[in-house]
Amino acid sequence: MDEITGRFLFVLHSHIPYVMNHGVWPHGEHWLFEAAAETYLPLLKTLRRFESEKQRPAISIGMTPVLVEQMKSDGFRERFSEFLNEKLNLAIKDVTLLEESGDSRMAALAGRWRDFYRDSIDTFQNFCGGDIVDAFRKLQDEGLVEILTSAATHGYLPLLSRDACVRAQIKAGIQVYENAFGRKPEGIWMPECAYRPAGEWVNPIVPEERFVRKGVDEILVEEGLEYTVIDSPLLGNANLLGMYSEKEPDFSKIHFSRTPYLPYRLSSGLQLFVRDHVTGYQVWSRHHGYPGDPYYLEFHKMKDTSGIKFWRITGTDVDLGGKQPYDPEIAEARIKENSAHFVGLINRLMAEFKETNGCPGVLVAPFDAELFGHWWFEGPRWLYEVLHLLKSTDSVVPVTCREMAEVSETAEVIDLPEGSWGENADHSVWLNDETKWTFRELYSVERNFVSFVQQNRGKWQKNSTLKSVLTEAAKSLLLAEASDWQFLIHKESALDYVEKRFRGHVGEVARFLGMANILNGRERLTADDEKFLERCHMKNDCFQSLDLTWWCEDV
């Protein structure tokens, strides 16, 4: 392998917050159904194509435990099938209406959507057997891909107020992974690539509260996890603020104290793979990235009778009324051009690194999976072309995180500052003036829950009703800790839904703790409390086998 120029690490991170049983449309289950239909099934079809060609794509896919829990549920299987059939019927209706109107061009596009949903139904029912997660499991068992775990509900780990809460997020994630994939996870996607080192922690809401805490990495390693992905600005001396804005950055002016093209290691033993900012820009940038190509499918404009998309982007500054009809043939040509450009960029960067440093580097390209197919319709095709082109050359070799870890055991040990892959490379997307109230409420129930569970361990271990109440409280706490609530508030998206969901889960924890105090006093629950317990158990249909001792290990 010494002859190679470098290695390429493609990491897709899949995540949807818990929406099952919490609304349908526009905010709720359809969010998950759209991602499954437009990203997860197309991704499976792409990977199956490699399998049929007897090639190994060598790609790492992070799947959050809360996403796994949702897609393994009976409710998802039933209602997702209904969703696909509804979309198919709408596409068929579009074909008929457009043919009758004489609009053959639009009718042909509608026919493509009809075929898309027919194929999706076939893939879900036959290839997946109604279980998308199990289909990914089989691909991992065959060695085609690697699946990474994550924190249970994508909790923003550096900002959780107790190490016990960080550990519980990780332990729940590991348990879900083992149940779904039949093995222990080795790698983890840290939510938002967010990290906090060991040391004194200052409560950002109540600065008077401060105490020494473990680093996020220490807890990950203690739980058996070996490697993760970080963003390049955390290496130091690289202020990438605004890098993905309208103005194209001058990458020659961005300097790192360490190269992002090598793996590193923390003193805890956790291995780090560093996101490449140059290739990341080519995909993430709204105005200069591939997904903004004027010939690709426009995400926001849909047919009012079916919600199906028939138009192309046309231009990033073109309003919806000016969008032109989509042309699949031109889009296909652009996919090939964009993928060839991306592979050429990878080869150039790795060749330059090896020439300068005398050894192969690694280029890490992590992205949100939902970009591919859902937001960027052509994304899965582009991904196939990129990996296919790389497989046809010998200079840069695609590898999984596990394979990279095996060749980087002597990686340099470094210290890492606190930060994330968000704007400013810090916590400001999640902790700001608009979101502080969420942490004020969250920290209160975290503190009360952890304190009660730790102080009353002997009682809930002997009292099955008390244990059931606290288990439901733990589920609600995990859901309240999801980083999605703060992210959506920052983006001013679905604000009413977000506030209702967040306050609802925080309120559940508080009420359950009140019920626990009643049981602790040897009193019985009221009929209303029992109905509330049962209702939450059914509505929050996830993490049904969690262990309360997870919150007792960091006393």
Image (tube, rainbow, N blue to C red):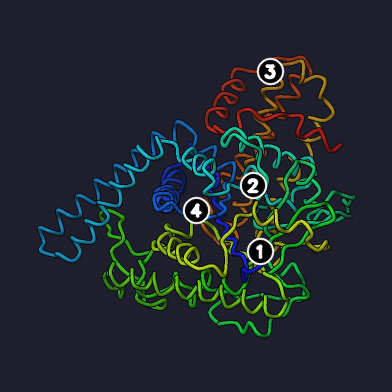
In the displayed structure image, the side of residue 79 where residue 420 appears, left or right: right
- Residue at 67% in and 24% down: 469
Q: Closer to the N terminus: mark 3 or mark 1?
A: 1
Give the residue type that dot 2 points to: Ser
Q: Which residue is mark 2?
A: 150
Split into 4 quadrants, where in the image is the C terminus?
Answer: top right
Give the residue type that dot 1 points to: Trp
Horizontal and vertical percent position of residue 491: 56, 62
Q: CA distance from mark 2 to mark 4?
A: 24 Å
Q: Which residue is mark 3?
A: 465
- Residue at 61% in and 45% down: 502
In the drawing, what numbered circle is on residue 56?
4
Q: Closer to the N terminus: mark 2 or mark 4?
A: 4
Give the residue type that dot 3 points to: Thr
**Mark toward the viewer: 2 or 4:** 4
The quarter holding residue 197 reads bottom right
The 10 Å Cα crowd at callout 4, few under 14, some 14 to 19, many 20 or more, is many
In the displayed structure image, the side of residue 253 where residue 20 appears, left or right: left
In the drawing, what numbered circle is on residue 421?
1
- Please determine whether, in this image, residue 415 is positioned above or below residue 225: below
Horizontal and vertical percent position of residue 336: 39, 71
